[in-house]
């Protein structure tokens, strides 16, 4: 059962957060809370020592939360993005944090440039009737950066302690 939870929970929540950000430009606090609580449950069920859970994973998430809220305070990312990055960092841990930041930055830059380029063109008629597409296409609106955060997290997930523990279970 633990293997199924490890293989499904994180990817499902990442996909949901990306879709939610694309369609509504919001990422629910429930997603971030579910990620943190889900990791804690998986870690404890897999036998991870409580000290490791607290110092290595929750501390990593807390550090990312401090950093991303600074970015939020400057208006560079949304609050949902900050919380998603932090809760994703809990799953990835310190060992994958640099790669996560790098991957999310590269993917986010590509996403941003792509959206800026699309905004210079007329919205196709099929998409012009979709509120989410109009919102993203409108100049001055933000970029659903949660997509980049989710894809980066999913790309690194097979390198995490949770995934590796499930693979050896």
Image (spheres, rainbow, N blue to C red):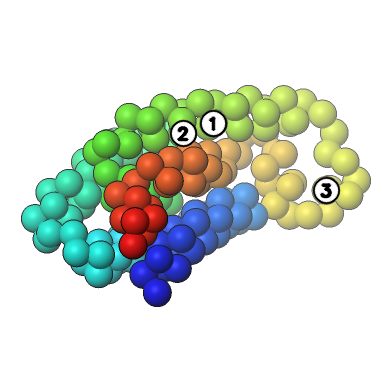
Q: Is residue 23 above or below residue 107?
A: below
What residue is shown at x 13% (from left), y 52% (from top)?
52
1 or 11, which is in the foreground? 1
Q: Real-space Cα distance between discs 1 and 2?
A: 5 Å
What residue is shown at x 27% (from left), y 44% (from top)?
93
Q: Which residue is mark 2?
A: 104
SS assignment at label 2: helix
- Image position of 65 (left or right of 23): left
104 or 49, which is in the foreground? 49
- Image position of 102 (left or right of 137): left
Q: Quadrant of residue 118?
A: top right
Q: Real-space Cα distance between discs 3 and 1?
A: 23 Å
SS assignment at label 1: helix
59 or 118, which is in the foreground? 59
Residue 23, position in %: x, y? 64, 55
Mark number displayed over residue 107: 1
- Image position of 125 (left or right of 67): right
Q: Which residue is mark 3?
A: 127
Q: Is residue 116 above or below residue 39?
A: above
Few, some or many residues within 10 Å of mark 2 (<14, 14–19, 20+):
many
């Amino acid at each position: 059962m633990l293997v199924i939870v490890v293989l499904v929970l994180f990817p499902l929540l990442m996909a949901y957060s990306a879709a939610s950000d694309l369609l509504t430009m919001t990422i629910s606090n429930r997603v971030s809370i579910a990620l943190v609580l889900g990791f804690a449950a998986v870690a404890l069920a897999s036998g991870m020592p409580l000290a490791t859970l607290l110092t290595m994973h929750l501390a990593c998430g807390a550090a990312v939360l401090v950093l991303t809220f600074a970015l939020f305070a400057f208006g560079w990312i949304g609050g949902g993005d900050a919380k998603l990055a932090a809760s994703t960092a809990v799953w990835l841990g310190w060992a994958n944090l640099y790669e996560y930041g790098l991957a999310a930055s590269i993917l986010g830059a590509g996403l941003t440039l792509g959206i800026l380029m699309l905004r210079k063109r007329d919205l196709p008629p099929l998409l012009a009737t979709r509120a989410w597409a109009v919102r993203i296409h409108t100049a001055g609106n933000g970029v659903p950066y949660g997509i980049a955060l989710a894809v980066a997290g999913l790309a690194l997930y097979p390198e995490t302690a949770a995934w590796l523990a499930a693979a050896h279970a």
